Amino acid sequence: MRVKKITESLRTKVYTDSGDFFGEVEEANLCDNKIDGWRIRVDSGMSSLIGGARGVIIPHQFIKAISDIVIINKAALPNPDSDFGDMSEELI
């Protein structure tokens, strides 16, 4: 297994587990020297899926794979029809 530096993952294309292009990695959020989440700049075609936000922070546990691309669990995305409530911190 090859170990990647966080900087190698920046600007990596992000896809959902159903194969839809979602956006690009903008930065990693660290907490206690561990990756806590990933800030993703959302593709304009997918912004309607998250209520028009330009980006979202995906908790690291919802990342399925990181290599040449990043695959996220689609269940990690906020539902635009629901009240965002305490999830508003995760939208950019």
Image (cartoon, helix red, strand yellow):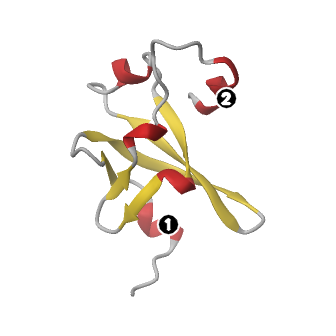
Instruction: Give the residue displayed 46% in from the left and 22% down from the top.
Output: 79
Q: Which mark is residue 89?
A: 2
Q: Residue furthest left?
A: 19
Q: Which quarter of the image is occupied by the N terminus?
A: bottom left
State whether residue 32 is above or below residue 38: below
Q: Quadrant of residue 4?
A: bottom left
**Which residue is more in the foreground, 69 or 60?**
60
Give the CA separation, mark 1 to mark 2.
24 Å
The numbered mark, 1 or 2, whose residue comes first in the sequence reads 1
Tell me if mark 1 has few (under 14), some (14-19) or many (20+) residues whose alpha carbon lies within 10 angstroms of its own: few
- Residue 71 is left or right of residue 5, and the answer is left
State whether residue 50 is above or below residue 42: above
Per the image, label 1 sits on a secondary structure element best described as helix
Q: Which residue is mark 1?
A: 7
**Which residue is more in the foreground, 32 or 25?**
32
- Residue 90 is left or right of residue 9, and the answer is right
Instruction: Give the residue displayed 52% in from the left and 67% down from the top.
Output: 6
Q: Could you tell me residue 62's position as x and y percent? A: 49, 51
**Which residue is more in the foreground, 87 or 9?**
87
**Which residue is more in the foreground, 46 or 75?**
75
Amino acid type for the residue under numbered disc 1: Thr
Q: Quadrant of residue 64?
A: bottom left
Q: Which quarter of the image is occupied by the C terminus?
A: top right
State whether residue 69 is above or below residue 85: below
Mark 1 touching mark 2, by CB under 8 A?
Answer: no
Amino acid type for the residue under numbered disc 2: Glu
